[in-house]
Amino acid sequence: MTFFCIAEKDSILGFKFTGIQTRQVSGPGDAKEALKVALATEDVGVILITEKASSFIRDEIDNFIYQHEIPLILVIPSRGEIRQGKDINEFLKRLIGISI
């Protein structure tokens, strides 16, 4: 089972360095296409999508989450954003045990 990351330009670089398959988005069309690619990619078990990228396709994400169990879609903070006092590295380490 592998990871797939959908993110905007500022957030995607760290995921590329870890070897996670990534797709960069800048608008709703890119985000919809990236989600289709992620869902069609064999062996993807977890899709990480940043808050900025998810804002483009929130309805599609919610619909998928309610209808399917796998792959798991996790919305994570975008680079530079602080979520409940934690940065993205702390958030991912606590959530799934990886650091970027």
Image: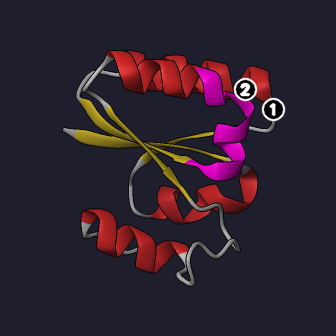
In this rendering, would 65 be left or right of 86?
Answer: left
What residue do we see at 45% from left, 26% from top?
A: 38
Is residue 74 or residue 46 the one in the foreground? 74
What residue do we see at 69% from left, 71% from top?
A: 81
Q: Is residue 1 above or below residue 9?
A: above
State the image quarter where residue 72 is shown: top left
Asked if labels 2 and 1 touch by Cβ distance under 8 angstroms, the answer is yes
The image quadrant where one finds the C terminus is bottom left
In this rendering, would 32 be left or right of 6?
Answer: right
Image coords of residue 22 (percent x, y): 51, 43
What residue do we see at 35% from left, 15% from top?
A: 67
Pick out the residue farthest to the bottom.
85
Image coords of residue 66 (percent x, y): 38, 22
Give the numbered dot on residue 66: none
Q: Is residue 50 above or below residue 67?
A: below
The amino acid type, in three-letter code, at marker 1 is Gly
Image coords of residue 3 (percent x, y): 33, 44
Q: Which residue is label 1 attached to? A: 27
Q: Determine the secondary structure under disc 2.
A: helix
Q: Which residues are drawn in magenta?
A: 50-59
Q: Which residue is label 2 attached to? A: 30
The amino acid type, in three-letter code, at marker 2 is Asp
Q: Of helix, strand and loop, which mostly describes the magenta segment?
A: helix
Q: Determine the secondary structure under disc 1.
A: loop
